[in-house]
Every structure is written in structure tokens, then in C-alpha cells.
Amino acid sequence: MTDKKFSAASLAAQAMGWIDPVTKAVVPPIHMASTYLRDEDNGYSSGRIYARADNPTFDQAEATLAALEGGAKALVFSSGMSAATACFLALAPGDHVVVPKVMYWSLRNWLANFATHWGLKVEFVDADRTDAIAAAVRPGATKLVWIETPANPTWSVTDIAAAADIAHRAGALLGVDSTVATPVLTRPIEFGADIVMHSATKYLNGHSDIIAGALVGARDDPHWAKLRTIRAQLGTILGQTEAWLLMRGMRTLFPRVDWACRSAQSLAERLAAHPMVTEVLYPGLPSFAGHAVSLKQMTGGFGGMLSVRIKGGERAAIATAARVALWKRATSLGGVESLIEHRASIEGPGTPCPPDLLRLSVGVEDSGDLFDDLDQALRRADNA
């Protein structure tokens, strides 16, 4: 694109305005090469050596994501887990980290089991309470404060600016899992975050057809160089085809998220009055505990994720999920299809997720159809 400053939505839609210089194609090619030719003087004037370190197919996705987040650099990974764990593997044994009690379950398990055995000192806190984060941080010893906002699956909200201030005053970095908010709704770097993580499988790709992760750094500094080295040395690189599909997905990120937000808000408001629903967990409801903070750091909507707690407990919740027709019973979120899941049974023993909770990922279907399908399932479950 030209030097004119376009909106983030326009940058995403046109993938930064990239045009292939040889063919003039508006869609980039997939570079499948695993290795690159040396020059006659034994150098690499192309800047590329081996595809485990980088690949031209990554360039566009990484540049676009960095621009959308307002960061200096981005890295794509083979999964959200590999992106997130790289942030902790960049630390040293003995370092102290502060993480949420409510967060992506697989990362929580990794932190509680592998990371502690490897030598990190992991402290779990109620991250929606900044006083709890402040009480847990140890100046000089804490190297990373990690938050997820909104946090899966209760959608609790953390004040990013407050958490950044606490982390920085203690000499620590702030990492933010912003998978659910996406750069459409929240740009954590603007609130002081040092690293932003995405499970790019979800909203960034948006089509439930790849596994991918991404990191965006506020600065291109020695710590960022360490993350890049970890990706190359552990081999957690994204496949070339997956990188191409990720870029394809990001081009429709803004309209997909906008649609999902509007549908989720409508569903949350209607479900809050449903006789079979005891509570709706959604940042867009004024009654939600994190609503005030959400208004400060989310623009354009409150996300496409909500959870409902069902009258009748676990039995009724599972029965409701069994009786939907339009919603799909599947794990994941952020795709064009709407998904429903009884999250506690997926996470298993030790989960902080209430047994009466159903997690809903709102896609791009008609919101009236989505409500009607849930309504009939709820009523049939009540009569079961």
C-alpha cells in the first residue's frame, strides 16, 4: 500500500496491499522450499538459510499481524501452545511467573506440571483482581506476568494497563493471551503489554482448518531474538500451507469478528432472561463483573464467546448440548460455525469450570436461528 495511513480493517482485507512483483497476483504464492541456495562467496544474500528458521510464506502473515496489533514484529508458530510455551521457555529455571487460575486449560496444565518440574516457580492468581496480581509479584524475581483476557471459559476480564504497570514496576514482562479479543477489539500493546499471544487456530484463521499460533512483540529487542531462536531450535515452525491459510483467514477477520460480536451480544441479552439459564457470562452485559474494565479496553464489541450456566446442573447442561441441531458439539472457538461444549467434562478433574456451564462460540449464522436452536434444546432438556 502507499504511505497513506489506512485503517486496520483495510490493511487486513488487502493483506497490507501486497502484490506479487513478478506476476502482479493479489494473492501470494506458497513457497514450499525447505532450503535456499548459497551465493558463490558462500553467503546468503537472500537472507534465508533454511526453512526451519523462516520461509517467505510467513512474511506476509507476520507483517500483517504485527501491523494489526501495533507491534514491532510477529512470529507464527505451529500451534497456540507452542507460541505460549515459548514465552516461558525463554525464561530460566528458578524464575518466578504469575499466571491466571482461569485460562486456556492446556497451557494451565503445562504450567502446573511440566513448567514447575523444569524449574519455573509458577504462581496462580485470580487475574481479574489486580490486587491479587500485585500481591503475587516478587520484585526482581518475577520475570513474567501472564494474563488472558477475556479468560476462557468464564470470560473474566483483566485490566491490561494495571497489570502492565504492576509487572513493569517489578522488573517483569507482561504477556497477554488475546485470542478471544483479537486485534479487532483490543490491542494489548497500546495498554503496555510486551508480548501478545494468539491461538491463531481460532479467530485469526477463522475457518477451523489449521492449527497455528502467533506472538507479537512490542519491541524487536534481545528478548524477541530469543523467542525467534527458540522457535527455530525447537522446530515449532508453521507449515507453509498453514501460513498461507492463516493469511487468507485474516483478510476477513474484521467482518467475521464484528458479526460474531453482534450475535453474541444479542444471544447474551436474550439468554439472560431464559427460564432455564441461571447466569450468562459475557463481558458485554452491564451485570457482568468485568464489564467496566471491558468498556475501557475493548472497542467495537465484547467478543463472540459467552458461557451460560444451566438450571438443573450438569445433567441438564449435557442434555442441552445433546439436543442442538444448528450448533455443533465440538472443541474450539472462533470459526464461522457456532460451537457448543460442556467444558468441565473436557477439562476433567481440577478444572475451575462449573459443571453446569456450557461454552458457546458464536459463528456467522443468523442469530435468531442460533437462539431458537438453543431455546428448543434447553426446553427439551428441562423435560428430559
Image: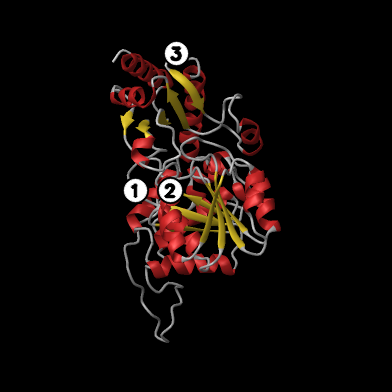
Kindly report the distance in space between the C-alpha atoms of the residues bearing marks 1 and 3.
Answer: 38 Å
Which label's residue is closer to the chain start, 1 or 3?
A: 1
| Distance in Å between CA atoms under marks 2 and 3 | 36 Å
Mark 1: few/some/many CA within 10 Å (<14, 14-19, 20+): many
Q: What residue is pinned by disc 2?
A: 200
Q: Are marks 1 and 2 in contact (CB under 8 Å)?
A: yes
In depth, the one of 206 and 7 nearer the eye is: 206
Determine the residue positioned at 63% across, 48% down. Answer: 133
Which three-letter amino acid code belongs to the residue tagged 2?
Answer: Ala
In percent of the image, x 47 and y 25: which residue is there? 263
Q: Nearer the viewer, mark 2 or mark 3?
A: 3
Going 39% across and 52% down the picture, which residue do you hit?
212
> Local crowd at mark 3 within 10 Å, few (<14), some, or many (≥20)?
few
Can residue 337 be seen at all in this image of the molecule? no
Question: Relative to the observer, which residue lies in front, 263 or 39?
Answer: 263
Question: Considering only vertical position in the picture, is 289 above or below 240?
Answer: above
- The three-letter amino acid code for the residue at tag 3 is Pro
- Residue bearing the label numbered 3: 275
**Relative vertical location of residue 276 with respect to residue 254 in this rendering, above or below:** above
- Report if the CB atoms under discs 2 and 3 are less than 8 Å apart: no
